[in-house]
Amino acid sequence: MSSATLTRAPDTSAPSTRRRPLRPARVVLHVFLAAVAVGWLFPILWAVLTSLRSYEYTASHGYVSLGGWTLDNYVTAWRTAEFGKHFLNSVYITVPAVLLTLFLASCVAFVIARFSWKLNIALLGLFTAANLLPQQALLIPLFRMFTEVPLPAWMSDSELLYDSYWGLILVNVAFQCGFCVFVLSNYMKALPHELYEAAMVDGASVWRQYWQVTMPLCRPALAALATLEVTWIYNEFFWATVLMRTGDKFPVTSSLNNLRGEFFTDNNLVSAGSVLVAIPTLVIFFLLQKQFVRGLTLGASKG
Amino acid sequence: MSDLPLIQADRAVPPPAATTTTRGRGRRLRLLSRTDRVVITLMVLVPLLLVVGLVWLPAAATVLLSGTDWDGIGPLGEIDWVGLKNYDDVVNIYPPFVPAVQNNLLWLAALFVVATPFGMFLAVLLDKELRGSRFYQTALYLPVVLSLALIGFVWQLIYSRDQGLLNALLGSQTDWYGDPNVNIWAVLFAAGWRHVGYIMLLYLAGLKGVDPSLREAAAVDGSSEASTFFRVVFPVMRPINIIVLVVTVIESLRAFDLVWVINKGRNGLELLSALVTQNVVGEASRIGFGSALATIMLVVSLVFITLYLFTVMREDRR
């Protein structure tokens, strides 16, 4: 393999190396990385390609061919799978869940970072660990609990927490809170404590310190977390699959499962559906990639 | 799902005033007004109730139920305690159990032995200041933003027997998702495809945090780049290594979406998570039995979660 050559590629830890002329090792490195990158993109590109071709054409010419270009698959997939409705369901679940997660998590994180109690570490552990448990380990009691808790009819036509958006929002918030508490409390601990002293001299209440001093300073972390959480909750599959029953109420990701029967016989439709479902996360990813990267490398240069 | 990418970054922020004022903070707490104390209590209590009520209590209930014969329908008063009978049944008279454990272990092995080192290798290559590094990173990270359920569909286009690309290229007639001899490998390939990008990102953040003077010192000593990495850089990244280990274990244990969209975890794709779900929402609801399976998952995950917490909290206090 090329790895032996690659590991001996010139050392570039010094910043001045950008202008160095290309060396053979570096060319090998680029070829290797480009090949891997294209290989990695291939399944997605293949899905896009397949989605743009008519079933009749690919059925008679095979998939390893070119031609039969059409947008009909998207129209058909959108209609058969009722994507409009399911996208809306995803919005109903994702938006409140992300806002609530960030709000609740920032509250806990603020208290953990601002005050020192003996229980702080236990609290942080309790939240962080909750995010890492396997969902299936909670399924049985939670399923039962959800079928027992009544909701008024105006909140859900199931009149239960089960099969309602409310239930899904709550379970997503409970699960995602831990991760956000962890990240935000670390971020808030790094804020200079003098800020609060100044705020206290001004007589600011704890709530105002949280809302007007800490939260504005946490915007970069909140933006990065919002980006991640939107992606994760939109992608969430398990809870919606087991805690929803009415087909019309499924969010997009778990509605995929119901399409299996209708779609699996026509790969071009499958691919159009897949691309449609992927679009929101891809748009977020490309628009907010800086957010992702900044969140990831935040302070790394100082570290 | 995919967690933890921000940890390293946030830990790297130097905590300016935190250590010096710890004691002062505690004292100030008593000076707070009554309203402030109510506000603080609510700020902690509301999220705490939610997490305890929807995560920790159900987890505890799962453990309790695993010792009972509850059918999931009758009132809670009719529950009989059966001790370890459910566990005995799971191991001895439940045919899918052994394949599920094998598949979960295989999942872990594939991610740990192939996908994780490959992700780390790519991170090392991308850590060099390369032109076009952003493009490579984006391409590798792209699968991470897709849900595993969706990934099942995307790879269906390649694996399908009659319409898939793979059979068209190989001229074979294999049903890659359906044939119990091969489907777990096909699924693992797709899962690994996503995992590599994730690990790459974690290590890329970790490598950025390594003090460059360490590498320079090693280079001055005449150490080759490979040996510098294994002897100096890799050990320094210990916290990231543990996080990656835990992430990999948890991901293998939680693997579910991919097999569920393919065939609900049957016929060669048995996984513990799928068996639990089948026993609860499937045709036969065997609660005690499903709970025993879930408890096994819970215990394994808690071991690694504890390891994870110790790692990140110790880093935190430094």
Image: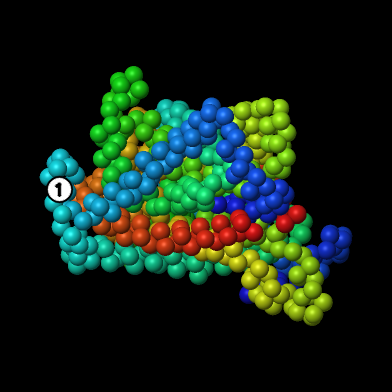
Q: Residue at x 52, y 60 (%)?
A: B310
- Disc 1 residue crowd, few under 14, some 14–19, many 20+, Cα 10 Å: some
Find residue B296 and report its horizontal and vertical position in percent.
31, 60
Three-letter residue code for mark 1: Ile
Find residue A109 and report its horizontal and vertical position in percent.
56, 41
- Where does label 1 land, which residue? B79
Q: Residue at x 26, y 63 (%)?
A: B97
A164 shown above or below A110: above
User: Quick one: SS at disc 1?
Assistant: loop
- Which image quadrant is residue A115 in? top right
Q: Is residue A188 left or right of residue B131?
A: left
B156 shown above or below B212: above
Q: Is residue A42 left or right of residue B135?
A: left
Which sits in the foreground, A126 or B181? A126
Which sits in the foreground, B188 or B46? B46
Q: Is residue B5 visible?
A: yes
Q: Quadrant of the C terminus of chain B?
A: bottom right
Q: Residue at x 30, y 20 (%)?
A: A153
- Which image quadrant is residue A195 in? top right
Find residue B140 and report its horizontal and vertical position in percent.
60, 55
Which sits in the foreground, B22 or A209? B22
Q: Chain of mark 1?
A: B
